[in-house]
Image: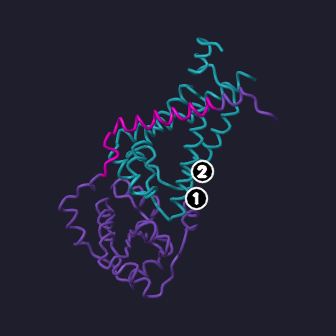
Amino acid sequence: MKVLTASLALVGRLALGFPLLWAGWEKLRAFDWWFEKFGQMELVPEASAGVVATAFPGLELVVGLALVLGFWTRAATWLTFGLYALFAAVIAWLLLSGQAAACGCFGPDSDLIVDGAALGLRLIAAAAALALLGLPNSRFSIDALLRVIVPR
Amino acid sequence: MTETPDDNRSRLGLMAQMGLLLVAGTLLGFGFNPEGLRPRKPPHRNKDSISSIYRAPDVELAEFRQMLESGRCMVVDARSGHDFVNGHIPGALAVRDRDSNDLTRIVRNWLPHSGPVIVVDSHPLDFRARRKAADFRLAGVQGARALQGGMEAWRKAGLPLVVGWDMDVVIKASRR
């Protein structure tokens, strides 16, 4: 049973972490495109749009990487929950304010658009992140490795 | 249940780790784009795309209403989000994207049957609507046109408006 839950935790970490890692990387790779797109969405006041658009992809990348590697797993999982919940809220807001928009989540080459499926997936991911907090950490993580090297 | 010092310590540790991850992510973003704090110039448009804005044909209100009744056109609102929420044409979508690939994706998903795209603005010269229609044409949507007189003409004709959040768009988005 313990092996099963630990394996589930590993799969969950990878399934939730890789999309964040990929999304962050794609945005940083095509930063000018992302910067313009973020401004067009009118999500935050114009004065702060530059700061948010600049900080955001790095944040996705770091949180995604921490989750995939299992480094500070609990903190990374809480942040992952926060990010997916935020994405769901943004998509819901875009739809409620009548916006038809290309998603922009995975860079300029991604075909995804803002729609009901995108909202549903983010809500499922946020719920999965919460569920992940209740599972024991897998042995395949930096946290587990650190516990072996530096026992408490 | 009482909280032990260990609980508090682990909670503080968790918050510190979250804070450090947030800081690391932010620093990474600014490392990739140190100029992120500076405002950027709008993207360059070549002369062809600017002149095509003015060459574009527009559509009169009467013809536009016929198109709406046939239900085969896509109405795009080019105004700000604030103006849109304060009153827009039923069924209109606010499209802020300008990138050709993004516009193609939007049309493919929201207008599956081929039909014209009509863009609406509130400005008397319909500048934003013409520019947005030009963006759509550059993205390959040949039938994109601006509505003559924009929202002012629509309001003056006493035609219906949707005010506030548009649940219709959410419902349509979840059905697709």
According to the image, what is the colour scheme of the structure? by chain
**Foreground residue, A54 or A61?**
A54
Q: CA distance from mark 2 to mark 1?
A: 9 Å
Amino acid type for the residue under numbered disc 2: Gly
Label placed on residue B114: none
Say above or below: A135 vs B132: above
Q: Which residue is mark 1?
A: B174
Q: Quadrant of residue B111?
A: bottom left
**Foreground residue, B102 or A67?**
A67
**Foreground residue, B108 or B41?**
B41
For label 1, the SS is helix
- Do the residues bearing badges 2 and 1 touch, measured as CB atoms within 8 Å? yes
Q: Quadrant of residue B29?
A: top left
The answer to whether residue B1 is left or right of residue B67 is right
Q: Residues within 10 Å of mark 1 (few under 14, many from 20)?
A: some
Q: Which chain is cyan?
A: A
Which secondary structure is most common in the magenta stretch?
Answer: helix
Q: Residue furthest bottom?
A: B157
Amino acid type for the residue under numbered disc 1: Ser
For the C terminus of chain A, the quadrant is top right
For label 2, the SS is helix
| Chain letter belonging to callout 2 | A
Q: Which residue is mark 2?
A: A120
Q: Which chain is purple?
A: B
